[in-house]
Amino acid sequence: MLCGVRVQDNLKVFASNSEKEQGPFNCPGCKHELVLRKGRIKVHHFAHKPPYNCERGDGESDVHRKCKESIYNSLSKCSHVTNLEVEADFGSVIADVYCLINNVPVAIEIQRSKLSVNEITARTSAYEKLGIHVLWLALFNKNLGEEKYNPKAWEKWCHATYFGRVYYWVADLTIAPVHFSEYQNYVESSSWYNECGEEQSAGGYYKSSKRYKTPSIGTYLNLATDFNPSYKQAWTRGTVHVPNCRVYNDKLRKWW
Ligand SMILES: [Zn+2]
C-alpha cells in the first residue's frame, strides 16, 4: 500500500513522503504496525510487519503501485478533480484511487492478478450502492498488439460491463480502450472414405474461435477528460454476469 497512518499525529501519509524516523506507522485497516519500504528500484510503499492477518495491500505488484501512484499524481494536477484520495476506505470497499471528476464520484480500480471475477463483481455492486461510478483498469501488455489474444475471465467481464471495451492503463492518465472481435480459426479440409466406400469431406472453412479474440485498440483516452458516468442494468450471457452498476466509460463511437 502507498499510504499508512503516522502514529504520532494520526495522519494518513505516503510512503514516498515519509522517513523511518517519523514512525511507527500503522495499517489504516487492521491498525497493525507497518514496515516502510523505500528501496531504490521499487515504488516506495508500506507492508504489514509479519505476522499479520489483513488483506490490505495483498497482491499488489510494483507495477500496480506505480500505476496507482502515477494516476494519483496526474489527477492531483487537474483543477476539475477534487476530493482526491488514494486507498480510500468506504467500509465495504477500498478504492485504489477515488475522486470527484466534475463533481462525479469516481473510483479507479486497478486489476491485480489475485482478484477473481466474483470479487470484481462484489466490489462493483458495493460501489453501485455507494453511488460511485467505477472504472476498472488493467495494465497494458504487449500481447494486445497481436492478432490473436486469449482474454482472461475478468477481461471478458470488463468487456461486457464497459459496452465492448476493456481499459488498459498505459502511463499517467493515458488509457488504451481495446475491443475484442471474433477471431476466425481455419478448419483444414480433409476427406476420408466411409464404410460404404463413399468419399466424405469436411473443413475448408473459417470458424469463430471460442478461446481467442482479435484485439482492436481504439484512440487513446485521457482518464480525466474522456469519460462519462453511465448506469448499466444487470446483464447475463453464458458465464458472464454483470450486476446493476455505475460505470465510468468513454464516449468514442465504435471503432471496430
Ligand atoms: Zn492491515
Image (cartoon, helix red, strand yellow):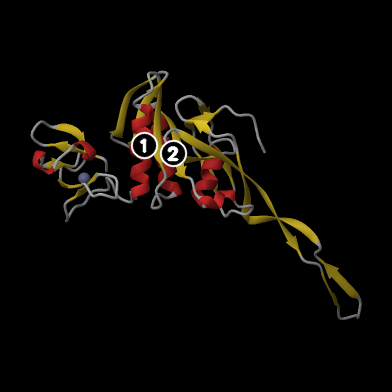
Is the residue indicated by label 2 positioned so its CB lies within 8 Å of ligand 1?
no
Residue 70's label in the rendered image is 1
Considering the numbered disc 2 on the image, is that residue within a helix, a strand or a loop? strand
First-in-chain label (1 vs 2): 1
Residue at point 53%, 35% (across, down):
234
Amino acid type indicated by mark 1: Ser
Q: Residue reaching furthest front?
A: 40
Residue 171's label in the rendered image is 2
Quarter of the image where one finds residue 102: top left
Q: CA distance from mark 1 to mark 2?
A: 7 Å
Quadrant containing the C terminus in the rendered view: top right
Please state the quadrant of the image where ligand 1 appears: top left
In percent of width and height, residue 186 lies at: 74, 60
Residue at point 52%, 32% (across, down):
221
| Discs 1, 2 touching: Cβ within 8 Å | yes
Residue at point 58%, 35% (across, down):
163
In this image, 190 relative to 244: left or right?
A: right
Amino acid type indicated by mark 2: Ala
Establish if 40 lies above or below 16: below
Establish if 74 lies above or below 198: above
In this image, 225 relative to 195: left or right?
A: left
Is the residue indicated by label 1 positioned so its CB lies within 8 Å of ligand 1?
no
